[in-house]
Image: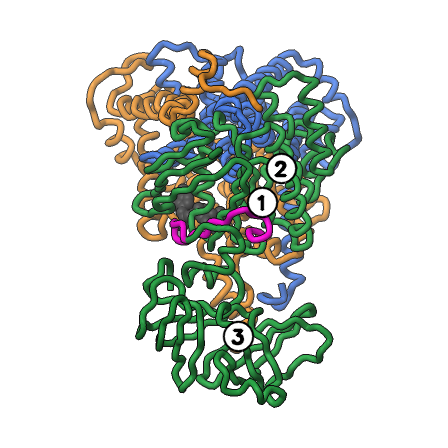
Amino acid sequence: MIDLELKNVTKRFGAFTAVKDFSIAVEAGEFVSFLGPSGCGKTTTLRMIAGFLEPTEGEIFIQGQKVNDLPPYHRDSGMVFQNYALFPHMTVFDNIAFGLRYRKVPKNEIKDRVMQMLQLVQLPGLEGRRPAQLSGGQQQRIALARALVIKPKLLLFDEPLSNLDAKLREQLRVELRQIQQEVGITSIFVTHDQEEALSLSDRIVVMNAGEMIQSGTPYEIYEKPQSLFVGEFIGQSSFIDGRVAAVQGTETLVELGNGLTMGVSGVGAIAKGDKVKILIRAERISVMQDSAQKHLEGRLNVLKGVITDVSYLGSNIYYYVRIENNAQFLVIDQMGEKSPLKKNDAVCLEIGFKSCLCFTSKTKGRV
Amino acid sequence: MAPSRGTPHAMGGVIERISSNPRFVLGLQLGPLLFWIVFFLFIPLLLIVFYSFCLRGLGGTIEYTFSLKNYIHFFTTPIYRKILVKSIVIAIEVTLGTLLVAYIPAYFIATTKTKNRLLLLILMIVPFWTSLLIRNYSWILILGREGIINVYLMKWGIISQPLELLYTEFAVVLGLVHWVLPFMVFPLFSTIDNIDFNLVDAAKNLGANDLQAFWRVTLPLSMPGIAAGCLLVFILTVGSFVTPSLLGGPEDLMITMVITQRFLTLFDWPFGSAASIIYLMLMILFILVYDRFIGLKRILKM
Amino acid sequence: MKRIFSGARFLKGFTIAFYMFIFAPILIVILMSFHPRDIVSFPLPGFSVKWWIRFFGNYNLLTSLRISLTLGAAAALVAGLIGTLASFAIVRSEFRRKDLLNALTFAPMVISGVVFGVALLSLFDSIRFPRGFIGLVIAHSLLCIPYVIVVVSARLADFDRSIEEAAMNLGANNFQTFKSITLPVLLPAIIAGMLLAFTISFDEYPATQFLATATTATIPVRIFSMIKTELNPQINVLAAVMVVITICIPMLAQYFLRRK
Ligand SMILES: Nc1ncnc2c1ncn2[C@@H]1O[C@H](COP(=O)(O)OP(=O)(O)OP(=O)(O)O)[C@@H](O)[C@H]1O
Ligand SMILES: [Mg+2]
């Protein structure tokens, strides 16, 4: 069953188009993230779904009912706000009970359901407090409880974790996912934090400048970006310019100049002679001391270079490597037990061709 | 599942529809204010304009004609010209006096430690809210012939005759300065508070001494606050009534007192109206000139 | 402070003198209310509460006090209602001629009370509306509206609108959201604005002198004529009462503003 459907939704503010021809269908129980840089229209889209904004064009359906003309208070969506938006003059109990009161739920039942929710968000016993007496993490859990208790058709989140510190954010992220799966509620989650989107979602919608760029599972988004924009936006990568020398299926041979060539996977239609950009995931490169690797010399996708900088991050280590044609590479290596390489060390980089994606300027999205 | 609520109750529906109609809501919000302003400010002022062209009839009635006599009378009678000039002179004296008295405290508050600053600001507001009548009355106790100042000066043998302090222009200016001080201190404080004192340090670094740095950097940067404060103080003072009536002598008449006298004791409403209009025109002229040379927009933003 | 004048002491000394200057008249009046004789003199020859006792036996003054208090309350209510409604439009809506409306709203703050008073007197006279309490409420409320607007719209500009959206999202319509969320959260600011309005009204003389009648003489009207005609220590008590009321009420207002 489709719980939420947007059909060619466009939103303009005056002459400015904030959301452009946006279409999506969300299955019941699915957890979908909208991911994109600041100002790309995520919040605008979410607010159209909640009913705070009217689409300029297009239609929105919630559980099959067209809701374009329905005010927010008749849409039965539960929204969790970035700044929690708890009612400061009410206790936690009254905050959670708020929606139930407007649904004419009997008193006893309100009490039971509020208590049940407090259990669910692991904050039993706080019902008498005021929002000002809660920590940020607690406030956000109450906000979630308040949205969940009305058993909405949809849960809408607008960067709910971004006001929390890193540790708490991670912890709440896990809890959020558990609760969502337990309740099985269809959720739309707006974020600009890729880790959040990758770890939480069944599906990620990457947006840019008001448009949907790509939609897919976290695996697809990370492993098979359909455009340079998506590849660039997600994960840490290096980019090299080149020209296509030969194409065979998706296997493509690219000249980097300086006599260097690489075997890469092409994305979209690519022809011989195209100017391309190669994207290489930093953690997919293996880096070795040059002197120890004589046997690899001359093989495809083995590049020689020099370490120009090292930054040590505990669990892993970042090497900045300059290869022979002066292109810069970022390499992320697991620390393991070996001792780290040093600045000015000569190194060999080995890269699997599936980890090198090449894009022409013709692929959709910003290049 | 929550009950599906396709069509709300009829009554709730009416409130709902009304309260989500932006034009209706705007009308509800602004209607009363507009009514108040139009009926109790705008129309009364128009009425005054109308009366100012009428004449005083027998026994304090109004003779409905169209005549410029009141205005002509006002500007051709030396005493009224003198009063008009006096009102402006007193306002200028008060403005400059207030600026002189207020700048240093404002500077001190703005550059002092945050903790004390709040206390100092609150202390500043307290007299601001204290009844103006009472403050003026207190000046009478202080400045009068048998007032505190004279009593002590005589007791200490500094003077042998009491000084004539009360019922003078000095008393009026003092009382007015005391009244308008907060209107000067607050704009000054907020601009000085926003000054980036690195600039002052930079000036000193370049060889300016403390006074030069103040004169060349701090003072020009606090100009917006000075301009805003002076505007407020001047406008309030020109229209002041209580202080000049209580602390001033027979010579210290201001235009508001002429209006009051005409309306309350002489029952010459048309002339009183003309004086009111002259006062309003003076205000408008002043604000226009101010806007031309200093700019009103900047002050409205403060 | 070293930054400007070499003497930080000069700045400090001047500021202390400044605060003495602004507080002296207030403290002196309160002190004088405990004067024991019939003619005010210095230094205080003793300490007595007899003028306080006489004050509470003075029917005329107590009547005036009652009039001033009810007038202040009524004006504050009217100004609170009108000013709060207008603040919503001013902060939350865009409409044509907003600047003009702002200027008009704040006009009563800068136009002399005398001119405003005679203008209203002319209006009431021309429509044969008798002078009295209602006229005073109208005049005072108009004078107080700007103060309410300043206080309420400042708070409204800071108002986090997402809590209203949250309420709507949970099923409250516009009216219900206003009633259950907006109004309660804004209430402290509205009360603070109304208390300030009360203080303004309580001390208003320039316009009041034209609109008050013998039966609606407010405390300022009494004080003014007492100062003009005879200086007796009775004024001191009245003055002390005024000081206490006009200081305590804004402090109460501050308390409401602090409370979130
Ligand atoms: N009411 C409005 N009027 C005019 N422009 C608006 C309005 N609301 C949003 N915009 C514009 O629409 C664009 C998209 O805004 P939106 O809030 O949806 O971005 P976002 O993706 O949520 O960004 P962020 O990650 O920073 O929250 C922005 O450029 C914004 O300036
Ligand atoms: Mg956003």
Badge 3 amino acid: Ile
Badge 2 vs badge 1, beta-carbon distance below 8 Å: yes
Task: Report whether A130 appears left or right of C129.
Answer: right
Judging by the rendered image, the residue that carries numbered circle 2 is A144
* Chain ID of residue with mark 3: A
Chain identity of mark 1: A
Please give the name of the residue rendered at 44% of the width and 39% of the height, measured from the top-left corner.
Answer: A25
Q: Secondary structure at mark 3?
A: strand
> Which residues are the magenta region?
A196-213
Q: Which chain comes out green in the rendered image? A: A
Residue matched to label 1? A160
Q: Secondary structure at mark 1?
A: loop
Q: Which mark is residue A118?
A: none
Q: Which residue corresponds to the image point at 54% horizontal and 74% vertical from the top-left?
A: A330
Residue found at the far front of this picture: A248
Q: Do the residues at discs 3 and 2 belong to one chain?
A: yes
List the residue tagged with mark 3.
A351
Q: Can residue B56 be seen here?
A: yes
State how far apart marks 3 and 2 are (Cα). 44 Å
Q: Nearer the N terminus, badge 3 or badge 1?
A: 1
**Quick check: is B62 in the magenta stretch?**
no
> What percent of the width, then of the height, locates residue C70?
58, 16
- At mark 2, the secondary structure is helix
Residue at 38 percent of width and 15 percent of height = C124
Q: Are marks 3 and 1 on the same chain?
A: yes
Name the colour assigned to chain C in the rendering.
blue
Q: Nearer the viewer, mark 3 or mark 2?
A: 3
Q: Is residue B51 left or right of residue A157?
A: left
Q: Classify mark 2: residues with Cα within 10 Å, few (<14), some (14-19) or many (20+).
A: many
Q: Is residue A126 left or right of residue A174?
A: right
Location of residue A126 in the rendering, given as x and y in whole percent from the top left corner: 74, 34
Decide which of tag 2 and tag 1 comes sooner along the chain. 2
